[in-house]
Amino acid sequence: MSSGLMDYLRAYFQPPSKRCKGSDGGGRQDGLLWYKDIGQHVNGEFSMAVIQANSLLEDQSQVESGSLSTYESGPFGTFVGVYDGHGGLETSRYINEHLFKHLKRLTSEQKSMSADVIRKAFQATEDGFLSIVAKQWTTKPQLAAVGSCCLVGVICNTTLYIANLGDSRAVLGRAVKATGDVLAIQLSSEHNANIESVRQELRSTHPDDSLIVLQKHNVWRVKGIIQISRSIGDAYLKSAEFNKEPLCPKFRLCEPFRKPILSAEPAVSVHPIHPLDQFIIFASDGLWEQLSNQEAVDMVQGSSRKGIAKRLVKAALQEAARKREMRYSDLIKIDGGVRRHFHDDVTVVVLFLDSNLVSKSSSSTRWPDTSVKGGSISLPSKALAPFS
């Protein structure tokens, strides 16, 4: 296929979610890889990258910077979202289109940013998607079995808010003044049944269900089905109304349930931004399956900012290839869908923190809005080799 035709197809099939507004511009596409090497946000710079492994990309992500309310007077700051879908892409795409809008509306109503605003934005997004599941239940019952993890970071008035459902992760890189090293600090709480505390929480909230967590093939799963205990979507594990025909039999539980098995309540934490805080890595589980927190932080610290998200994705793929005893050059030739047997979709957003800009963003200065939504497209052709 000629390069001209390939460029035409990329432009023609590019979904609206990839179009970016503001002066920051959009990302670039290279086969199964989407990336934005460097961009500006209110509090510094950022880098984004996404690699597709599934037949359709289930990861979605966004960086929104500028006004965090519907009023031009602010407050101002930066919003990062990483949405790791499962069972399909409908939920993660819905979150990508609606969560930030809910947050801006709620911030305007309460005239400030807060953990409560973020929780309410999550709940409004959950309610919105479940209403779609209900409306389309008879024609598209499979929507009841689609869900998404949801990781959000908000910087506003020198404060960092982290909210998470599922097992995506936010990791802070903080300089150690005495040595010059950069320490990895995990900021998000994860909700994966392979974590003992998560299993204990499930058992305590479902005391009458001795089968709330089961181990299958050496992996702990909620009801023996799903690894995460909190998500947006997954209506079939939140209401018995959606755990019956016409839903596919493999998702239907044998025994009835009265209370939701999964939760949509995010774990929210609030952190004052310290002058030694250098950057935050937001990433879906596809990255953390391959790299440790400190490995990722060391790589960011030891590299130039431009293209660092893409280099983290490459490092994850190299590790995935090593585990399967194959060459990286062979792995990146594999098409989406088949690629899922080797690694998951991987989304990375690295948000650099400029202490001067963090303090200035709390002022009444009017900041231009930036909006970038990360994603990939599937073309009916062999995957192009990224990172060449």
Image: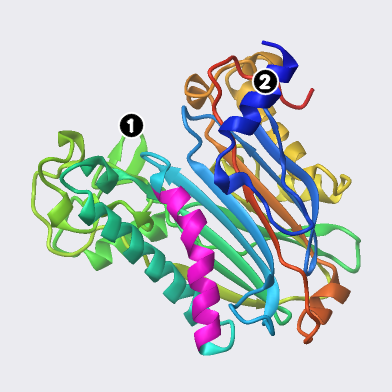
Say which element carries label 2: helix
Taking the image as drawn, is residue 181 in sight?
yes
Left/right of residue 57 with respect to residue 41 in the rendered view: left
Mark 1 and mark 2 residues within 8 Å of each other at the beta carbon: no
Question: For this rendering, which residue is in front, 235 or 275?
Answer: 235
Q: Is residue 304 magenta?
A: no
Image quarter hosting the C terminus? top right
Q: Earlier in the sequence, mark 1 or mark 2?
A: 2
Q: Nearer the viewer, residue 227 or 99?
A: 99
Task: Judge the density around disc 2: few (<14), some (14-19), many (≥20) Cα neighbours within 10 Å.
Answer: few
**Magenta extent:** 91-109
Place of residue 207 in the rendered image (x, y in percent of width and height, measured from the top left): 18, 65
Kindly identify the amino acid type of the residue bearing the numbered disc 1.
Answer: His
Residue at position x 62%, y 25% in the image: 9
Q: Which percent across, then down, holds residue 167?
A: 49, 52
Q: Circle 2 sits on which residue?
A: 6
Mark 1 packing: few (<14 Cα in 10 Å), some, or many (20+)? few
Q: Position of residue 138 (x, y in %)?
A: 15, 45
State the residue position of label 1: 217
Query: In x, y percent, where is residue 336?
Result: 52, 24
Please report the residue visible at 61 percent of the width from the left and 54 percent of the height from the top: 62
